[in-house]
Amino acid sequence: MIQPYVTLDIKNEVGYIEFFHPNRNSLPSEILFLLKQSIEEAGKNEAIKVIVLKSGGDRTFCAGASFNEVMAVNSPEEGRVFFSGFAHVINAMRNCPKIIIGRIHGKTVGGGVGLIAATDYCLANTFASIRLSELSIGIGPFVIEPAVSRKIGLSAMSQMTIDAETFFSAEWAKDKGLYADIFEDTETLDIAVKVLAEKLSKYNPEALSRMKSVFWEGTCHWDKLLLERAEISGKLVLSEFTKKTLKRFR
């Protein structure tokens, strides 16, 4: 079995950050930490002008939080620390001075939708449906809500949250503004991502950085807000309802 990883590769002034976990690209604490670290590293690296966020494998972009790790939480503090990992990654993406392009090649659930929403521009294939399943397991998408609502609006965010057992199509996600464009297959998607990233890498980096600051205006309070939301999730995950529900997915 391939081991989990997060890599950062530089090609033609584009930094490609790729994460992988054998359990459908789920996000345990270790992967979240490495993602945050790689995003911050890429943001400081002068050889990188634009960043692409992608995942490995050929079917699922991200399965969200690691159920095994969530089930192992035994205290509110442990829960807070785990869900804070998502807060740290989203804030790292928000604070990164470089444009981040998302390359979404398959289904995405829960916290993975938050990662997509935190990109600055996102391209996907037709298989890239999305779901916010948190309410169905007894918690809620508290940490990622600000990022998702900012991108698709509170109404669409509410629809996904309430209809927690439904996958919303890539076409729906494009219509709501989560994806800028969708492509028939992964090969075409990869070509589009490469062309866009390398084109942007030739633009004035100062202009790109300042424009990104404009994109994220009014979000400075997220450093505190997302951690407060992590505390809510950390408490709810200890509920008998959630523990019982998660056992069914083991």
Image (cartoon, rainbow, N blue to C red):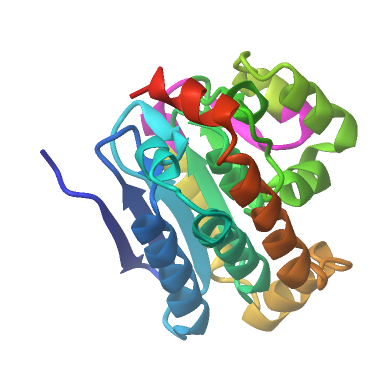
The percent coordinates of residue 77 (x first, y second) are: 55, 61
- Left or right of 108, for residue 235: right
**Residue nearer the viewer, 192 or 150:** 150
The residue at the point 45 percent across, 75 percent down is: 42
**Residue nearer the viewer, 81 or 6:** 81
- Left or right of 147, for residue 80: left
Q: Which segment is the magenta one? A: 174-189
From this viewpoint, is residue 15 visible? no
Q: Is residue 96 above or below residue 200?
A: below
Magenta stretch containing residue 179, yes or no? yes
The percent coordinates of residue 246 (x first, y second) are: 45, 26
Magenta stretch containing residue 153, yes or no? no
From this viewpoint, is residue 151 visible? yes
Asked where in the image residue 200 lies, by quadrant, the reply is: bottom right
The percent coordinates of residue 102 (x first, y second) are: 54, 48
Tell me the quadrant of the picture where the N terminus can be found. Answer: top left
**Residue nearer the viewer, 19 or 213:** 19
Q: Is residue 57 above or below residue 92?
A: above
The residue at the point 29 percent across, 43 percent down is: 21
Asked where in the image residue 18 lies, by quadrant, the reply is: bottom left
The residue at the point 81 percent across, 73 percent down is: 220
- Left or right of 68, for residue 162: right
**Residue nearer the viewer, 144 or 247:** 247
The residue at the point 33 percent across, 66 percent down is: 8
The percent coordinates of residue 65 (x first, y second) are: 47, 41
